[in-house]
Image (cartoon, rainbow, N blue to C red):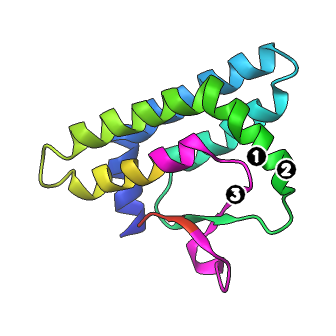
Amino acid sequence: MKTLGNIIWLVLAGIWMAAAYVLAGVVMFITIIGIPLGVQAFKLAGFALWPFGRTVIRNPRSDIALSTIANVLWFIFCGIWLAIGHVITGVLLMITIIGIPFGVASFKMAGLALVPFGKTVVRAKDVGDAQVVVAIG
């Protein structure tokens, strides 16, 4: 079922949102100082492309101060625009009955798009006792 969900997601929203993350990553890499933001954008592009069966958890090894600074910069330069893209995509997906679960997934990803630092994407079956931030599928 995850594979079917991912294929439908890929056609309806995944390609477009992944392309937006890649564009944000390329722009961040051009600035040199934004390379860490660009790396995060590329990681999120992979998640936006094929999200079902994976989940986002808090990274216990991340430095809270650095994550906060990176999240503030990310929010200003990329996060707000990517989150708006997820919200618009979610609204469009919610128009049809079949698209409702995908719209919900897009809304969940909008929150992740706002503040992604301090989190990591893992396979859903590998979660264990970690605190889940975004669970899709």
Q: Residue 65 carries which label?
A: 2
Q: Are marks 1 and 2 in contact (CB under 8 Å)?
A: yes
Q: Residue 119 carries which label?
A: 3
Going 70% across and 17% down the picture, which residue do you hit? 27
Which marked residue is nearer to the observer: mark 1 or mark 3?
1
- Write the residue at 70% across / 36% down: 72
Query: What residue do we see at 50% from left, 26% from top?
Result: 81
Instruction: Compute the Cα span from label 1 to label 3.
Output: 11 Å
Picture coordinates of residue 82, whole percent (x, y): 50, 32
The image's mark for residue 68 is 1
What segment is highlighted magenta in the picture? 110-132
Determine whether, in the image, residue 26 is placed left or right of residue 50.
right
Q: Is residue 92 above or below residue 120?
A: above
Magenta run includes residue 23: no
Horizontal and vertical percent for residue 74?
Answer: 68, 33
Q: Residue at x 72, y 30 (%)?
A: 73
Between the residue at mark 3 and the residue at mark 2, the CA separation in whole angstroms equals 14 Å
Quarter of the image with the N terminus in it: bottom left
